[in-house]
Every structure is written in C-alpha cells, then in structure tokens.
Image: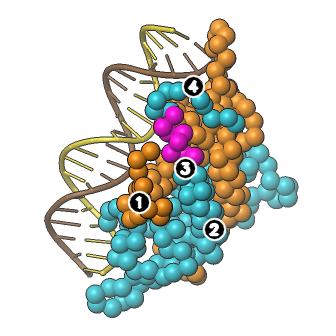
Chain colours: A cyan, B orange, C brown, D yellow
DNA sequence: CTGAATCCTTGCCGATACTG
DNA sequence: CAGTATCGGCAAGGATTCAG
C-alpha cells in the first residue's frame, strides 16, 4: 500500500475514478437483457436452460454474455455441478437481489402506466396538440 | 366503441397485447441513454443544450432520438418557445417522475455497491475460486 | 438554438458449428 | 447441457451538414 499516506480524505482523482466506475456499472446494468435476466431469476435458482426459457426471446449467446457480465460484477452466483451432462445453476447474490428490488418497482411502474403511455402514443402519432402536462 | 360489447373481462388476446406492450415499453426505457436523461432532468426544466451538457458524453443525435421516444411515451413534456433563436424546454411528466424515482434508487444502489463490484471484478479477472456467495 | 437527414463506422446480436 | 468461437447482417450510434 503506497497510496494516500498523507491524506485520509478522497482526493479529486478518487472521485473521478469512482464516478467513471459508477457510470461503467450503470452502463453494464442499464440494458434490456441484463435487467430481464435479473428479474427472471428473482429469488430462485435456475439452470442455464431454464433461464433461457424464462427470458422470452433471448438468444443463447446473449444469455451467456450477460451472465458472464453479471457474474463479473458479482450480481449473480454461478455454481457448476461437475456431473455429466453438466449442470450449472445461477442465483442472485446479495447485491444482485438489491438491484432486483429496483427492477421490480420498474416493472410495476410499467404496468401501472400502460394506459397512459398507450394514449400518449396515440396522441403523438396523430400529431395532435394535446400534449402531456408536466 | 365497438369492442367487447359482450364481455367486461379482459380476454387472453388483451392480456397478450398488454404483455407485449409492457415488454416494448420496458425495452424503450431500459436503456442507458433514456435512464441517464431522466435522471439528469430530475425535478428541473432544462433546455436541449443544457440537457446535452448535463448528460456526460451523449451525442446530439442520441439526445434528440431519446427525447422523441420519451415524449412519445408521455414521460417528458416538450415546450417550444417560438422565439428566435428557438428555445425548447423539457420537463418530466407525472409518470416520468414516477420512473425517475426508481432510477434514483438504481443510482444509489450503484454507489452503495461500488466496492463490492470492484472487488468482484478483481477476483473474476484473476480467475480465483473465491466466488461470490449467494 | 433545435432538429432532421445523410453518410459511415462500429458493435450488437443471431445462427451455426465445435468442445468438454 | 453448457460454453466458446466464428461469421455475417443489420441496426445503433457518431460526425457532419443543412434547414427553420
């Protein structure tokens, strides 16, 4: 340890690093497939193939790719059973479940606002002046 | 109105339609730029150029594109002041602010878990067996 | 200042085939 | 069954330009 022997407070460089890291994580996580996978996992433990069936429309490749990413970030736990044929199970970690909670509220937000959005789209399509009020 | 004169309950077709709509909205909204724009707007009213400065790294094109999408879905309100040069202001609508609340918790989740994720990445890079525990 | 349209590059993503 | 690698199409997204 050679860093910051003279100061216990985070300096500007630290803050910038933390910010860019946060942004990177946000970019990783704020994508359709990642969120759908997290939502599908929920409190359960699922095998690769089960997960694939659960997440409507995801391809083999996208699933593995996103699972690797989520594992790398410590959001899912990957357990390999060395049987034949292999059996690999995925579970959300603590932080993963934390994120899932917010994805849940995002999903319910979507359903709560289906009608509003549907109507807004109609208005937008017809180009009527009756815009949304803030 | 000619639909469903014989039944007040949603039938299967309705449910499937609602599901695909929900998925569509989710796909619209669950993307990096859209969420960052919503987060940047917050409770404020911002002009196009201000918003562009606020959302680090977004391009002119992505900003307009996502703003149109958010407006179409009724999440942001777009107000044009017919001056010269033109002045266009963006504000979150009610539903938009609702979504923002969950984006907020997502952001704080990110910051709360910076360390965990950073360490998980290190472990993943070195390929050590000390994986995350569920 | 905004916004639309154009070109052009990059990377996503699906399909496929091959290992353990 | 699960994972990796490769190829190719196509859409996302950046830079630039023109219009209102």
Find disc 2 in the rendering and name its residue.
A101
Image location (x, y in percent) of residue A36: 48, 63
Camera-side residue: A14 or A24?
Answer: A24
Q: Relative to residue A105, is residue A4 drawn left or right?
A: right
Instruction: Please state, as top left, top right, bottom left or bottom right, where the N terminus of chain B lies in the image.
Output: top left
Q: Main secondary structure of the magenta part?
A: helix
Name the secondary structure under disc 1: loop
Find disc 1 in the rendering and name its residue.
B6
Between disc 3 and disc 2, the foreground one is: 3
Spatial CA distance of label 3 from label 1 is 22 Å
Q: Residue furthest bottom?
A: A83
For the record, the magenta segment spans: A116-123
Between disc 4 and disc 2, the foreground one is: 4
The vertical placement of B15 against D13, above or below, is below
Image location (x, y in percent) of residue B38: 64, 43
Residue depicted at 48% across the width and 70% down the height: A40
| Residue B54 position by quadrant | top right
Spatial CA distance of label 3 from label 2 is 24 Å
Q: Do the residues at pointers 4 and 1 share their chain? A: no
């Amino acid at each position: 340890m050679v860093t910051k022997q003279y100061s216990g407070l985070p300096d500007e460089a630290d803050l910038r690093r933390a910010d860019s890291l946060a942004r990177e994580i946000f970019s990783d996580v704020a994508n359709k497939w990642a969120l759908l996978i997290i939502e599908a996992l929920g409190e359960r433990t699922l095998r690769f193939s089960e997960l694939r069936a659960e997440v409507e429309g995801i391809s083999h490749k996208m699933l593995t790719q996103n699972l690797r990413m989520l594992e790398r970030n410590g959001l899912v736990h990957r357990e390999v059973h060395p049987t034949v044929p292999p059996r690999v199970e995925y579970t959300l970690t603590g932080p993963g479940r934390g994120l899932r909670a917010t994805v849940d509220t995002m999903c319910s937000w979507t359903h709560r606002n289906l009608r509003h959005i549907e109507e807004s789209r109609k208005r937008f399509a017809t180009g009527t002046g009756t815009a949304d009020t803030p």
